[in-house]
Image: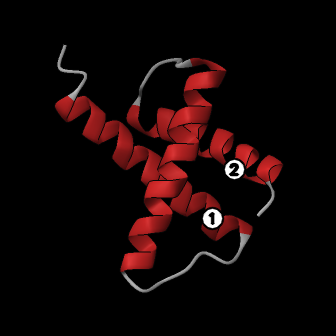
Amino acid sequence: MSFVYWILIGLAAGWLASLLTKSGKPGIVGLLLVGMTGALLGGLLIWLLGFSANTLLAELITATAGAVLLILLLRRWVWRG
């Protein structure tokens, strides 16, 4: 996967995750960080379960699910406001 492709998937996943979790407006850098980290987390989790994401849609769903999970974990343990 090329770096530009990974950035685009990360941005889209971060944006979708922020909509699903009602996280407000984190900005482009926040979306990118959450999306790319979520893509790594989601990819690791599906790999551990024995699956793989081979299409654009599967990669986007995996990255979004990972980003949502990341946001929920951060809310639970870090962002206790």
Q: Residues within 10 Å of mark 2 (few under 14, many from 20)?
A: many
Is there a contact, CB below 8 Å, between mark 1 and mark 2? Answer: yes
Q: Point out residue 46 in the picture as x, y percentages from the top left corner.
A: 43, 73
Q: Quadrant of the N terminus?
A: bottom right
How far apart are labels 1 and 2 at the CA level? 8 Å
Q: Earlier in the sequence, mark 1 or mark 2?
A: 2
Relative to residue 7, is residue 80 drawn left or right?
left
Residue at position x 29%, y 39% from top?
72
Amino acid at pointer 1: Glu
Image quarter (top left, top right, bottom left or bottom right) of the C terminus = top left
Q: How many badges with numbers are in the image?
A: 2
User: For this view, does 46 lie left or right of residue 16?
Assistant: left
Q: Which residue is drawn at 25% across and 30% down?
A: 75
| Secondary structure of the residue carrying numbered label 2 | helix
The amino acid marked with disc number 2 is Ile
- Label 1: which secondary element: helix
Residue 79 quadrant: top left
Give the farthest residue toward the top: 81
Closer to the camera in the image, 78 or 22: 78
Identify the residue at horizontal 58%, vertical 30% (top origin): 31
- Read off the residue under disc 2: 9
Q: Residue 76's spot in the image, x, y percent?
A: 19, 34
In the rendered structure, find residue 59 and report the number of the disc placed on it.
Answer: 1
Q: Which of 55 and 77 is in front in this view?
A: 77
